[in-house]
Amino acid sequence: LKLQFLYLIAHLTRPHTRTMQKATQQMLTRAGRRTYATGKDIKHGIEARQAMLDGVEKLTKAVVVTLGPKGRNVIIQQPYGAPKITKDGVTVAKAVEFADSFENLGAQLVRQVANTTNDMAGDGTTTSTLLSCAVFKEGFKAVATGSNPMDLKRGMDLAVKEVLASLAAQSRHITTKEEIAQVATISANGDVEIGQLISNAMEKVGKEGVITVADGKTLDTELEVVEGMSFERGFISPFFVTNTKTQRVEFEDAYVLVCKEKVSTIQTILPALNFIAQANKPLLIVADDVDGEALTTMIYNKVNGKIKVAAVKAPGFGDNKTNTLQDIAIFTGATMLSEDAGTMIKDQADFSEAMLGTCKKVTVSKDSSIMLSGGGSLEGIQERCDLLKELIDAEASDYSREKLQERLAKLGGGVAVIKTGGASEVEVSEKKDRITDALNATRAAVAEGIVAGGGSALLYASKSLQKLIDDPSIIPDQKVGVRLMANALRLPVRTISENAGVEGAVVVEKVLDENKEGFGYNAQTGVYGDMFKQGVIDPTKVVRCCIVDAASVASLLTTTEAAICDMPKADGGAAAMG
């Protein structure tokens, strides 16, 4: 009996013993397996700079083919969908990535130059990439021949200060609609239609107005201007529709009730409904939401022709919703009803006509609302606009700043939408990139003025560097830094000319020989002359950002003495130890 019991115990525990033995064997195998860290690869001196220069040159060759009115397109493979075709320098730069880690280091830094220029000025990314490569290439040669890299950098910094002073002296303020159209046309790679659209948009909504770019649904690019206070919210119920043909609510000389809270009970709005019934005027209610008996009562009376009323949900979310409702209240001259402020209507005694705002015309569709000629005081609206401008200046987030600018534009006059047309999605995307660039360039021109385009301003500024080269107080290595900056500033004119099929070196020499401010080569027409008169102009801000950003990164690359990258990972694990 005892032997049988021991056999039974051994039989029951055998599966567990086998499992433990298997687990133990796996642990021993793992412990015996040697694991390796990826490690770092380090290159020094000329070897490191050469590897980074290779990456910079490859990236730049892909980007500079887009420069100028006769620049070519670049086609980029996308992770999904059709390939992207573009002439936008920063879009090309973002798409470039190399297998070699050291080449990628250089490319990433120049890509950062393009991104910075794009963020600051909105255009000029191709020029900044070209200048970065040129300065780094010249700096690489100078260091290889024995120049001190730190003195080279100091020389470059001196040259940048002199060039910026020259650009400021050349700059002219933009005043006319034609000049705005010229700036936009040049930035859109010579597309006159885009230049005219942006000029018309700025004329209608003002220089500080909001102009957005959207995908169109036709072959033609169109401009749509929405005047007055507009927001992306439509009627709560289709029973409010007054124009059955267009399926819209259309009111004239309407009252406006603005409420921060959800309206469910009839007591909140009954005094206002009684008032508009007696006054025989329409009422627009903008509230957090309207439902329950309040909505039912409004629909019943509207359908029976007793009152003209419509309800719309408040636009936005969270704090943005409250702020937008306050904007609407100021625009219409209404009092925003809120539990927090103690302005909610609980009975007839709480209500007064002053709580309602007014509007000359209201149009509400299923997904948008527009109010024209609000009854708010001009002083109140101006005060609100000034507050929004201060908030925009202080805001760090791009998204929040954009929302504030939209609110400012709606209070101030309107929003212009450029609807990009084209025969295919790829064409629309390419044109949209050019319109966005042109729009940013135009805003930059309005902000800081214009200089001669086509690279002429930089070429003329390079002549001012001669006095630094002749200055005996500047040491030789710093003069080398000034010279290489002067050589780099010739490249934009040269590259634009070569992209147009003309010998670039000949064009550069001819423009330099003329020695006249504003004189340059129009690559679109092939004519030499005054660039301002020919309408070939660039925003000063764009040119300034190009030279500052390019010189900053290129000089740092020139002073690099060591580069550290991750070593490539080996495929598979190492074999177990015997």
Image (cartoon, helix red, strand yellow):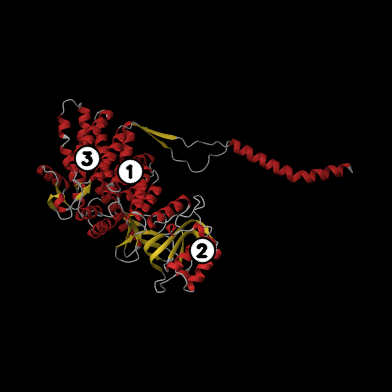
Which quadrant, please, contains the N terminus?
Answer: top right
Crowding around mark 3 (Cα neighbors within 10 Å: few <14, some 14 to 19, many 20+) is many
Residue 173 in the image: x percent, y percent?
A: 20, 47
Contact, mark 2 vs mark 1 (Cβ under 8 Å): no
Residue 116 marker: 1
Numbered disc 3: secondary structure: helix
Along the polypeptide, which appears first: circle 2 or circle 1? 1
User: Which mark lies nearer to you, 3 or 1?
Assistant: 1
Numbered disc 1: secondary structure: helix
Residue 319 in the image: x percent, y percent?
A: 46, 50
Residue 488 marker: 3
User: Which mark lies nearer to you, 2 or 1?
Assistant: 2
Residue 44 marker: none
> Considering depth in this image, is 241 or 471 the residue closer to the camera?
241
Residue 178 in the image: x percent, y percent?
A: 19, 55
Task: Give the distance between the C-alpha atoms of the residues marked 3 and 1, in whole angstroms.
Answer: 20 Å
Q: Residue furthest left?
A: 514
Residue 372 in the image: x percent, y percent?
A: 35, 61
Residue hosting label 2: 270
The amino acid pointed to by label 1 is Thr
Query: Looking at the rendering, which quadrant does residue 13 occupy?
Result: top right
Along the polypeptide, which appears first: circle 3 or circle 2? 2
Query: Looking at the rendering, which quadrant does residue 468 occupy?
Result: top left
Contact, mark 3 vs mark 1 (Cβ under 8 Å): no
Task: Give the distance between the C-alpha atoms of the residues marked 3 and 2, in whole angstroms.
Answer: 74 Å
Q: Residue furthest front?
A: 349
Q: Examine the rendering and report whether any part of residue 168 can be seen.
A: yes
Query: Looking at the rendering, which quadrant does residue 154 occupy?
Result: top left
